[in-house]
């Protein structure tokens, strides 16, 4: 097989592939066999019709069409591999020549395909990153302690106007013109949470129990999402959360510690871990930003357009030009990041272990509220496991890259992120362990296929 590549633009190429008859022959033989099993020709049993009879009765055109359809994808994949191309979308294939008759000729086709562009990444050792210090203050500890007290607090009714932080039980209706489009009753809402309607916090602030007010706001969901509505809200009750005293009794109630001081020390440790995690996230974000600043990443327009169309079609907003512009920008940004991180993962020769993949899938299953086994089975049935491997590889690429970069805080102190980004040594140990387990499993399966032992003779 011969193949040639013509670059149409940085993200699109034209592949020209020529396959001689001998390479196409296995597909032609398969075509004859398949057609022989399908046709009814007097004097021949199904599956036993000779090729020459098929040529006479069915026609060479049907045979070669079947053969081309059967082998085209494999030849295309082989050409991609030979030319080190990484497709980002399905190709537009044009078959320009087929064998004119059995025994001679060639298959020739072209494929226009959008591919991952070649990027010249900077040397990681030249990159400097700075993050905020991981200093834990008394305020950090107090914030965590208050959050813990909130969990053990009790709601108590108050006879005063509602204020931020209060819990208000509300009845709410929304109208567009004279049509009531939404309503809820007896819903508890905390003022300041901002998780219902725009303007609701302001409307409820200052209301006492059984008082009503109206305001205008865009609806946050449903068939009229985004449309302005007249909203009427009644506060049926106002409650505040009373917090337990922060003392030794509370420490014993809310934790395994006997004293408040012990609890605070543990909260300080948790805060330090959280700050360290924040530093790792900040370092990863800063590294991605620096790489994007250093490298021009062209994005394939066809891939972007397809993703935008899919997104808008799901939302039934294909005619919303303003939203289309927003989604297009988001799609470009996501694809630009993906291309950069895929290139980085390849440069660093990142490998995704089975344990890393399973850990990621279990985490994802929780986000979707599914059992891990059910979630993984769903992905397998949809052919999405390779995409998940890609997600893990991109995330790991940033972690591996950070191991080669000196990260400092704004005070000039070196930051140790090893707890969050791992190490090459740990990766090697994990890889060796998984390989040993795979070999042991393969050996066990081989032993199981040797067949039953010969029964003993009396």
Image (cartoon, rainbow, N blue to C red):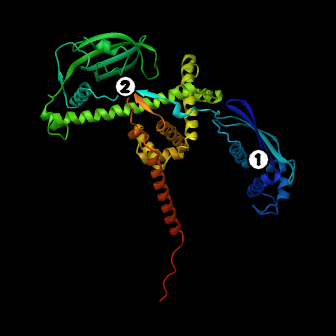
Judging depth in this view, the residue of 414 and 447 nearest the camera is 414
Horizontal and vertical percent position of residue 289 = 51, 26
Looking at the picture, how far across and down is residue 122, in whole percent? 57, 31
* Residue under pointer 2: 411
Which residue is at 66% across, 37% downward?
A: 90
| The disc label shown at residue 68, or none | 1
The nearer-to-camera label among 1 and 2 is: 2
Left or right: residue 138 versus residue 63 is left
Residue at the bottom extreme, as displayed: 458
Q: Residue furthest front?
A: 412
Residue nearest the observer in this picture, 4 or 155 = 4
User: Image quadrant of residue 245?
Assistant: top left
Name the residue nearer the viewer: 19 or 142.
142
Relative to the observer, which residue lies in front, 414 or 155? Answer: 414
Q: Is residue 366 left or right of residue 110?
A: left
Q: Position of residue 156 (x, y in %)?
A: 17, 23
Dot 2: few (<14), some (14–19), or many (≥20) neighbours within 10 Å?
A: few
Q: Indicate the secondary structure of the residue bearing disc 2.
A: loop
Task: Using residue 98 as the reference point, say whether residue 360 is left or right of it.
Answer: left
């Amino acid at each position: 097989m011969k193949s040639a590549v013509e670059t149409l633009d940085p993200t699109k190429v034209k592949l020209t592939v020529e396959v001689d008859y001998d390479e196409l022959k296995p597909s032609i033989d398969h075509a004859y066999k398949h057609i022989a099993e399908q046709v009814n020709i007097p004097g021949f049993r199904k599956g036993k019709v000779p090729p020459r009879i098929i040529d006479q009765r069915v026609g060479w055109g049907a045979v070669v069409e079947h053969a081309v359809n059967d082998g085209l994808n494999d030849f295309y994949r082989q050409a991609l591999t030979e030319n080190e191309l990484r497709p980002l979308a399905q190709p537009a294939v044009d078959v320009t020549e087929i064998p004119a008759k059995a025994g001679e000729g060639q298959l020739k086709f072209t494929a226009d395909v959008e591919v991952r562009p070649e990027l010249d990444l900077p040397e990681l050792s030249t990159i400097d990153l700075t993050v905020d210090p991981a200093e834990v203050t008394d305020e950090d500890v107090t914030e965590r302690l208050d959050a813990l007290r909130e969990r053990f607090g009790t709601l108590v009714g108050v006879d005063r106007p509602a204020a931020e932080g209060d819990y208000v039980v509300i009845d709410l209706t929304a109208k567009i013109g004279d049509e009531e489009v939404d309503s809820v009753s007896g819903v508890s809402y905390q003022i300041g949470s901002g998780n219902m309607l725009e303007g609701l916090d302001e409307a409820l602030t200052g209301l006492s129990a059984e008082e009503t007010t109206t305001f205008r706001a865009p609806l946050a969901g449903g068939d009229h999402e985004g449309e302005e509505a007249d909203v009427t809200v009644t506060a049926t009750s106002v409650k505040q959360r009373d917090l337990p005293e922060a003392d030794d009794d509370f420490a014993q109630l809310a934790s395994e510690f006997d004293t408040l001081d012990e609890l605070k020390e543990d909260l300080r440790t948790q805060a330090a871990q959280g700050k360290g995690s924040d530093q790792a996230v900040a370092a990863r974000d800063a590294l991605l930003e620096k790489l994007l600043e250093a490298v021009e990443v062209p994005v394939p327009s066809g891939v972007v357009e397809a993703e935008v169309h899919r997104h808008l079609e799901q939302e039934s907003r294909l005619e919303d030009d303003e939203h289309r512009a927003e989604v297009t920008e988001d799609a470009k940004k996501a694809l630009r990041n993906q291309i950069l991180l895929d290139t980085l993962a390849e440069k660093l020769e990142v490998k995704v272990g089975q344990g890393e993949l399973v850990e990621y899938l279990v985490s994802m299953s929780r986000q979707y509220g599914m059992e891990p086994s059910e979630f993984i089975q769903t992905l397998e049935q949809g052919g999405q496991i390779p995409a998940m491997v890609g997600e893990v590889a991109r995330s790991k690429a940033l972690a591996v890259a950070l191991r080669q970069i000196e990260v400092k805080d704004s005070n000039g102190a070196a930051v140790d992120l090893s707890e969050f980004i791992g190490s090459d040594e740990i990766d090697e140990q994990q890889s060796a362990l998984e390989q040993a387990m795979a070999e042991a499993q393969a050996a066990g399966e081989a032993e199981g296929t040797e067949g039953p032992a010969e029964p003993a003779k009396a």
